[in-house]
Image (spheres, rainbow, N blue to C red):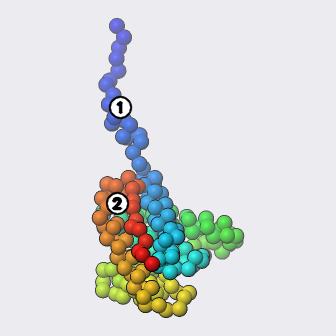
Amino acid sequence: MARRGPAVNLGALKRLIFRPQPADAARALYRAAVDAARRPAVMLALGVPDTLDGRFELVTLHAALLLRRLQRAPALGGLGQGLVDLFVADMDRNLREMGAGDLSVGRKVKRMASAFYGRLDAYSDGLDRGGDLAAATERNLYGTLEADSVRAERAAAYIRAVEAALAAQEDAALAAGELSFPEAPPC
């Protein structure tokens, strides 16, 4: 008679092996934020210029709003750091692809990371502390354009909609890297 080994629960083993790892989840969340930022409908509806600055501002906006959501759930704290790490690595890679020299990349990435945290603070001020969210969008999303209060208010409304949509998403879904951003506002 052949000896049998211990019983193995294949379902539990599969969940252990194939469950999303935090780095994979952070990568999926960052990718969703970048994809949302790059939607032509968002750029068009908000009137953000299709330039390097405009693209940077939209990626920063979506990543900052996502980071705010992750920070509100202590169990997702590691994902927030992973998101920031991916943002910095993405900026580094993009600068290198654009031909920035090795000696200047670090300095430029540091400025971009500082800009990210500055925008995070400005949007948080407008969302949480009674600051002027439209003014923050005017300074950041539209810093290279002529002032337009209607456009800035539309952007502020979009930011509030994204904030509400992110707040409604389950922690477990975010931990698995599942995320959905709202559609762009009508033009």
* Image position of 2 with respect to 37: above or below: above
What residue did someone put label 1 on? 10
Image quadrant where one finds the N terminus: top left
Q: Is residue 43 left or right of residue 66?
A: right
Residue 90 image position (x, y, % from top left): 56, 65
- What is the quadrant of residue 69 in the picture? bottom left
- What is the quadrant of residue 127 in the picture? bottom left
At horizontal 35% and vertical 21% (from top left) the residue drawn is 5
Residue 105 image position (x, y, % from top left): 63, 72
What residue did someone put label 2 on? 76
**Looking at the image, can residue 109 be seen?**
yes
**Looking at the image, can residue 136 be seen?**
no
Label 2 neighbourhood size at 10 Å, few (<14), some (14-19), many (20+)?
some
Q: Spot the residue most to the front.
A: 187
* Image position of 97 with respect to 156: above or below: above
Q: Which mark is residue 79?
A: none
Label 1 neighbourhood size at 10 Å, few (<14), some (14-19), many (20+)?
few
At horizontal 38% and vertical 52% (from top left) the residue drawn is 176
At horizontal 61% and vertical 67% (from top left) the residue drawn is 94
Number of numbered discs overlaid on the protein picture: 2
Amino acid identity at mark 1: Leu
* Image position of 20 with respect to 58: above or below: above
Sequence-wise, which precedes: disc 1 or disc 2? Answer: 1
